[in-house]
Amino acid sequence: MEAFSKQMQSLLLANPHSALVSKPNVSHQIVEETRRKVLGLFKADPKRFDIVFVANATAGIKLVAEAFSGYSQGFDYYYHRDCHTSLVGQSDAYTLLDVAALVSTNPLDLSDHLAAPDFIVLSFYKMFGFPDLGALIVRKPAAHVFEHRKYFGGGTTEITVTGQPWHMRKEKALSSRLEDGTGATHSILALSCAIGTYRGAFGGFEDVSKHTGWLAKCLYEKLAGMKHVDGSPVCRIYKDPASTYGDARTQGATVTFNIRGMDGNWASAAKAGAMAAARDIHIRTGSLCNPAGMACALGLTADDYQRAYASGFRCNSDQDVMNGIPTGMVRVSFGAMSALSDVEAFVRFMGDCFVEKAGQASEPTLVTNVANVSEGGEESLQYSEHSAGSSLHRVKSITSDTARSAHQFARPRVPSPCLPPRPEPKGRSGEQDRVHLRLKGQPNHSNELG
């Protein structure tokens, strides 16, 4: 941010479209230099790849989908069951790879252009935190699929006439034909600063991958060994049987799990996230924008989700345990700035709030969010008074009266180690996903250099 602020105070950035081709202005020079920097991050040869700046990874996916939609014969679309929601909305000829999650902590090598995907999408905020910008990297032999794209915006044409449906698109580079309107010059400048700062602070993706992988391994081992007083596990951790924490080739820097009480009831993932946020610990909860993968891990079917929706379940709802079955998960993700102290803080949070100990009354695992209690409604909480200046409440009792059942839990009058939950900040997370697209009736041209 300091580097970006300094640049903003010293540069006057004009519309890059205002410059002559023979005399590019400062804005144009910054944009093109940043393109080269991004390709350099992934060892991508500019002779083999084009890069198009977009709002985020999803916008890049949409751009590719719109290009294929322009073909009158249609196209076949195959996606991985565990892919991101953005790819569901959209192999033998063309391949699109979403690397938004992968490159946040791991290197991506595109030096072998023949083995590279045709289209690659990513979000830079997941790599650097700032700016809010994404990119679509296109292997040049696949660039022709955009020839049938119907829409064009300012700055993408050489000439446009009125009275007739005729125009000529720019041919210099794919980006000049696809980046509609004035580019996000200030965000691109921020990206250039972020790349330099990141390299100076952390070295490179290889170093970040080792660091974050080690942190994830530490947390995984702590959570896997966490037990209630009766010896039952606190967490059910979801991981591929073939993955190994500490091996970046098989496992990323995330730990995904659900929390279970000693009585066998599942804790609400959403409420666990809100409780963590009250301690300034920010985690991701819910379906993680990976609906099919999560459903497979939880053993849920499409009918289960339709019944849950009919009974009132909605995305980001705090009522995320339906008929005793969780409909979401908790995910802890590590980044370049994460430290061992973050692991220790989260382990303490889990021990304070979810591990049942000797002499402790059983904690109700389906706790209502204080902020969402309705007056005289279905749920209520009763508090005893708490001392001035203290953020710890003394919970006397919790009463839940729903349409299906009524339960009352009593707790001892002792201070709770968990702060009252507050709304969790919104966040997104992309996944590494591969999809395949094939034009109907067309041969495979993806490996031919044009």
Image (spheres, helix red, strand yellow):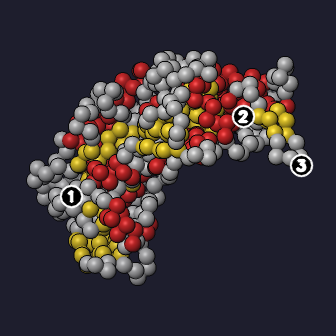
Q: Tell me the kind of residue under disc 3.
A: Gly
Closer to the chain start, of discs 3 and 2, is 3
Residue appearing at x 40%, y 49% in the figure: 290
Where residue 183 appears, as percent x and y from the top left, is 73, 36
Query: Dot 2: what SS?
Result: helix
- The residue to which callout 3 is attached is 163
How far apart marks 3 and 2 lie (CA) works out to: 22 Å
Confirm or deny contact between disc 2 and disc 1 (CB under 8 A).
no
Q: Is residue 371 above or below residue 284?
A: below
Q: Which image quarter is the N terminus in?
A: top right
Q: Which residue bears the numbered disc 1?
A: 261
Residue 61, position in %: x, y?
55, 42
Nearer to me, 428 or 394: 428
Query: Residue pushed farthest bottom?
Result: 376
Secondary structure of residue under mark 3: loop
What's under tag 1, amino acid-wise?
Answer: Gly
Query: Under tag 1, what secondary structure?
Result: loop
Residue highlighted by disc 2: 177
